[in-house]
Image (cartoon, rainbow, N blue to C red):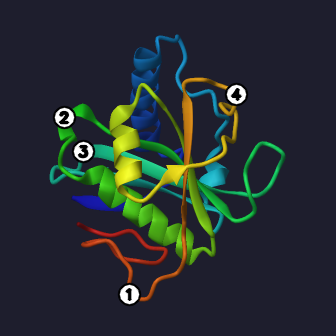
Amino acid sequence: MNIQRVSFGHPDAVELNDRVQLEYAARFGKEEGDITPLDPAMFEPPQGLFLIVYDERGVPVATGGWRGQEEDGHGYADGDAEIKRMYVVPEARGRGLSRLVLAALEDDARGAGRSRMVLETGIKLPEAISLYTSSGYRPCAKFGPYRFDELSRCYAKPLAAAAGESAPGVTTGRQAASV
């Protein structure tokens, strides 16, 4: 597996984003997926990052990104790094890719000086909730466009700098890695 930093506007990112939107719509029984407004500039370093995992054949199989947030009256706090578009294609699930992406995002956000990772997910995505809670995320006050939605759940994890902390097989800092 190869993790690459790309623009949120990269064709592979657009393709996988379209796929996750279809899954959101199907799981939540809606015509549209996630209505959160996103712009590729939100994921540009040093204020964010977007990653794609490519398999051995060079096929994109997973994504994830973070974007910097500050206190804005929508529930965010200064220093937040918000996780967006975590997704693994169905045929590549169960291989630990989401954990690799999550660890790389956390390391990068920590390196960028962010103090807390936050995310919003939904109760109809139990696999996501399990991933995040087993990775140290805890429920927090709701934020963002879904803060009043009864199907929404928000989680947070402090990003305290820890000496020697890194994910196995993932380069720490602000660079992509082969895994």
Q: What element carries label 2?
A: helix
Q: What element carries label 4?
A: loop
Residue 138 picture location, percent across and down = 50, 52
Ranked by sequence position, the earlier of labels 4 and 3 is 3
Ranked by sequence position, the earlier of labels 2 and 4 is 2
Residue closest to the eye, 166 or 138: 138
Q: Report whether residue 87 is seen.
A: no
Q: What element carries label 1?
A: loop
Amino acid type of disc 4? Phe
Amino acid type of disc 3? Val
Q: Which residue is drawn at 46% across and 83% down?
A: 162
Q: Name the residue under label 3.
A: 59
Label 4 or label 3, whichever lies nearer to me, is 4
How many C-alpha atoms fall within 10 Å of the one at disc 4: few (<14), some, or many (≥20)? few
Ranked by sequence position, the earlier of labels 1 and 4 is 4
Cα–Cα span, label 1 and label 4: 39 Å
168 vs 12: above or below: below
Q: Mark 4 points at which residue?
A: 148
How many C-alpha atoms fall within 10 Å of the one at disc 3: few (<14), some, or many (≥20)? few
Label 3 or label 2, whichever lies nearer to me, is 2
Amino acid type of disc 2? Glu
How many C-alpha atoms fall within 10 Å of the one at disc 1: few (<14), some, or many (≥20)? few
Q: Mark 1 points at which residue?
A: 164
Cα–Cα span, label 2 and label 4: 33 Å
Residue 34 picture location, percent across and down = 56, 28
Q: What element carries label 3?
A: loop
Q: In which quarter of the image is residue 102?
A: bottom left
Residue closest to the eye, 13 or 92: 92
143 vs 135: above or below: above
* Lateral position of residue 47 relative to residue 154, left or right: right
Q: Name the residue under label 2.
A: 91
